[in-house]
Image: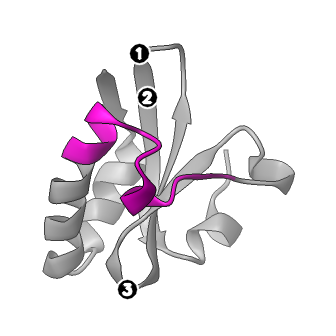
Amino acid sequence: MEINLSPRFKRSYKKTPRYIQKDFDKKINTFIKTPDHPSLKTHKLKGRLQECLAFRLRGGYRVLFEFCGSNHVDLLDIGSHDIYERFKR
């Protein structure tokens, strides 16, 4: 699976606490192998973000992403649950 990190994702990642970065670094490997693995609690979003999905990290953090083909994923943002409100395309 090809993963693309958006500039917004990269900026947000740098701002997250170190323990969240470590959790992401572990879970991204699971995501690459099995995007719908139960431990990730991957879910489709609704409303204006209906084309996006998210998976969970520790402490209420989420990774916002979208599939762009069968083997390509764009990671859009990472942050606490409020990324859903602040995310604009």
Q: Tell me the quarter of the image containing the C terminus.
A: top right
Name the residue at 47% across, 43% down.
36
Q: Residues within 10 Å of mark 2 (few under 14, many from 20)?
A: some
Check disc 1 and report the residue beneath it: 71
Name which residue type carries label 2: Val
Q: Mark on residue 73?
A: 2
Q: Secondary structure at mark 2?
A: strand
Task: Report if the CB atoms under discs 2 and 3 are less than 8 Å apart.
Answer: no
Q: Does 51 appear above or below 58?
A: above
Name the residue at 46% across, 81% down.
60
Q: Residue furthest top?
A: 70
Q: Position of residue 58 (x, y in %)?
A: 33, 78
Q: Is residue 60 left or right of residue 31?
A: right
Q: Residue furthest bottom?
A: 59
Q: Mark on residue 59?
A: 3
Within the magenta stretch, is there residue 63? Answer: no
The span from disc 1 to disc 2 (Cα, nearest Å) is: 7 Å
The span from disc 2 to disc 3 (Cα, nearest Å) is: 24 Å
